Image: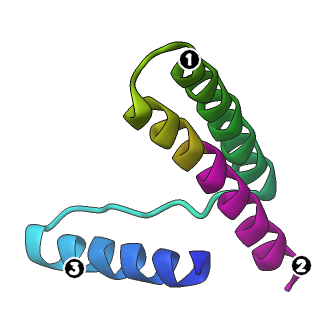
Amino acid sequence: MLDKMYMIMDAACEWGNKNLGTSIRFPKPTKKSIVFSAFSSGIIGSAILVYGFFSNHVWILLLGSLGIISSVFIYQQSVKTISR
């Protein structure tokens, strides 16, 4: 999944370079940066989820849950990508 995203972003950068005359490279993140991204997404998602428990808004609970789910997804994809 992440490999497909990298290929799409690389193609978009190449298109921009060719058509706009710029020099843009899409950086490929390291394992450390992907794990840090997943960890920080989980912390922020957890904080939003806790805030949602104390507020009367269901959408805040959903937003926090989405943050936690995305952090788990990012971490699982990074493990799959790195282990290949």
Residue at point 64%, 21% (across, down): 50
Which amino acid, mark 1? Tyr
Q: Which residue is mark 2?
A: 83
Counting residues from the start of the chain, the first of labels 1 and 3 encountered is: 3
* Image location (x, y in percent) of residue 11: 34, 82
Q: Is 63 or 83 nearer to us in this picture?
A: 63
- Residue ID for mark 3: 15
Above or below, 62 relative to 14: above
For the residue marked with disc 3, what is the amino acid?
Trp
Residue drawn where x is 70% and y is 29% of the image:
43
Query: What amino acid is at disc 2?
Result: Ser
Q: Tell me the residue at 85%/86% (across/down).
A: 84
The crowd level at tag 3 (other Cα within 10 Å; few <14, some 14-19, many 20+) is some
Which residues are drawn in magenta? Answer: 68-84
Residue under pointer 1: 51
The answer to whether mark 2 and mark 1 are in CB contact below 8 A is no
Q: Main secondary structure of the magenta part?
A: helix
Vertical placement of 44 versus 34: above or below?
A: above
Q: Residues within 10 Å of mark 2 (few under 14, many from 20)?
A: few
Horizontal and vertical percent for residue 22? Answer: 21, 62
Q: In the image, which disc is placed on residue 74?
A: none
**Residue most extreme to the left:** 20
